[in-house]
Amino acid sequence: MGMRQSLLFTKTRKEVPADEVSKNAELLTRGGFIHKELAGAYAYLPLGLRVVKKIENIIREEMNAIGGQEISMTALQDPEIWKKTDRWDDEKVDIWFKTKLKNESELGLGCTHEEPITRMLTEYVNSYRDLPFSVYQIQTKFRNELRAKSGLLRGREFAMKDLYSFCRDEEEHNQFYEKSKGAYMNVFQRIGIGHLTYVTFASGGMFSKFSHEFQTVASTGEDTIYIHQEENIAINKEVFNDEVKKTLGLSDNFKETKAIEVGNIFTLGTRFSEALELNFKDEDGKMHPVFMGSYGIGVGRLMGTVVEALSDDKGIIWPESIAPFKVHLLSLGDDEAVKTEAENLYNSLKSAGIEILFDDRDGISAGEKFADADLLGMPYRLVVSTRSMKDGGVEMKKRTEEKGKIVSKDELLATIKNA
RNA sequence: CGGGGUAUAGUGUAAUGGUAGCACGAGUCUUUUGGGAAGAUUUAGUCUCGGUUCAAAUCCGAGUACCCCGACCA
C-alpha cells in the first residue's frame, strides 16, 4: 500500500491552531490527521483514519482472542428500556443527547449500550447451555459532555469499543473479567503504550463499588493515580485510602502521577439483567438473572494518548503497529536521476508489500520535507537525493534516531521487512 | 453546571472611535533545493443581531461559537 504525498488532499501546517491547546489536537491537526468539526467532534482524514483502523484492528483481534463476537448496534435508542433501568432521566444521566420524532415521542443517541444489548439478548438466551459468552462492537457513542476538551481525549462523539460479557454466576464472570485484563494489556502493549499503562483500581461508578481502569502515564492526563512499583498496579486517587490498600494487600510504597484513562472494565452483576429480564434456566429448570460485565476502550482517546505520550518537540512518533505508513520516502531536489531512483524505490517497496508514503512533491525544499516527515511521524524515513546516490544507496533513519545512515536496497528491504 | 477569557482573509496575527495592515498559505512567472528558500505579481477578512456616534474591528447590550480553570465523567 502506498500513497503519493503530492496527491494527498490534506496539508501540513506550521502554525498551531489558535483554538487547540492540547498536544494531541495540535500535532494531529497540524499534520492533517484530524479536523475539528465542533467542540468535541473531529473528522478523521486519510492519515488519521489509517491510524484509527489499525487501532481498531488490534482491539478487534484481542477481543476475538477472548471469544468476543463482533456486532454493531444502533446509535438511536428507545427510551423505554432506559426508563426500566432508571437511566433515562436527565437527573440520573446528564450527558444524553435526546431528540424528538415528528410525533413528539423521544429518542436518545446512545452513550453506552448495556440496555439495548441486554434487551436484545432476551431473544437469544434461554438456558445455562447458552452461557457464557461475550459480545462487542466498535461503534460511535454520543455524550453531551458539559465540557469537551483536550482534543481527542474527551469528545461528544467518538468511537468506542464496548464489550459485554454474560455469565451464569459471579465465579464464571470473574474468570472472564480476569481474562479481559490480559486482553486489554495486550492491546495497549501492541499499540506501543504498554510500558506506560497500569491496571488501576478505581471506583465502580453507578454499577458497583469498584472497577478497574487502564491508566497511561502522561503529564497531560486528567486523572491522578498512585502506582505501586513492585506490584506494577495502581490505585486511582478517588479510592486511594487505607481500606483499599489493605484490601489489595499493598505496602505503602506508591508514586503519584498523572495519567489518561484508556480503558475501564466493570462488573455489572445482575443490575441490567434483572431490570430487563435477561434470565436463563439452570439444570433444574430454575430461573436466574444473567451475570454481566462491561468493558470499554475509547478508540480516539487511545490515538490521542499515543500522541500525548510518545511525541517530541518536532512532531508525532507513531509506533510501527499503528503508524499510517511504515515508511516515509522523501525525494529531494529536481534532479531527474534522483526522481527516477525515488520512483523506482517507491514502486519496489510498494510491491514488496510495505506501507509507504512517498513525498514526491516538486518545488518543496529539503528542509520542509524533513520537517513534515518529523511532524507526520512515520517510523522509518528514507531519503533519495544526489548526496545519497553519490554515497551509493539510500539514507535510512528511524524517527527516534538523530542521524541516518546509507544502506543498500537489499539491506533496506531486510531491515524494514523484519522490523 | 459555576467561574474566567477570546472571536479580524484558508491559517496565524496587528490596527487612540477616523485609510482594515503584516506573515504564512493559495495562483502566475523567474531563480532555488540536505533542516520550514528569494524576488516580482495576484488573491482573500472584522461571528450574528441590535444600540451609541458625524463616524464602530474598536464602546454598550443580547445571542452564538470556541478555549481555559473547577465540578461531573456509565
Image: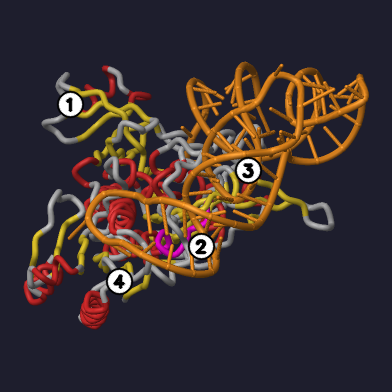
In this rendered view, identify the residue nearer to me: A78 or A271: A78
Tell me the tag on residue A334: 4
The mark that comes first in sequence, 1 or 4, is 1
The subunit letter for the residue under badge 3 reads: A
Q: Type of residue at label 1?
A: Gly
The subunit letter for the residue under badge 1 reads: A
> Mark 1 near mark 4, Cβ–Cβ under 8 Å?
no
The subunit letter for the residue under badge 4 reads: A
- Check chain identity for marks 1 and 4: say if they share one: yes
Q: Badge 1 is on which residue?
A: A249
Up the image or down, B16 lies above or below A401; here it is above
Q: Type of residue at label 3?
A: Trp
Q: Mark 1: which secondary structure?
A: loop
The mark that comes first in sequence, 3 or 4, is 3
Q: Looking at the image, can residue A292 be seen?
A: no
Q: Type of residue at label 2?
A: Leu
The mark that comes first in sequence, 2 or 4, is 2
* Boundaries of the magenta span: A42-49
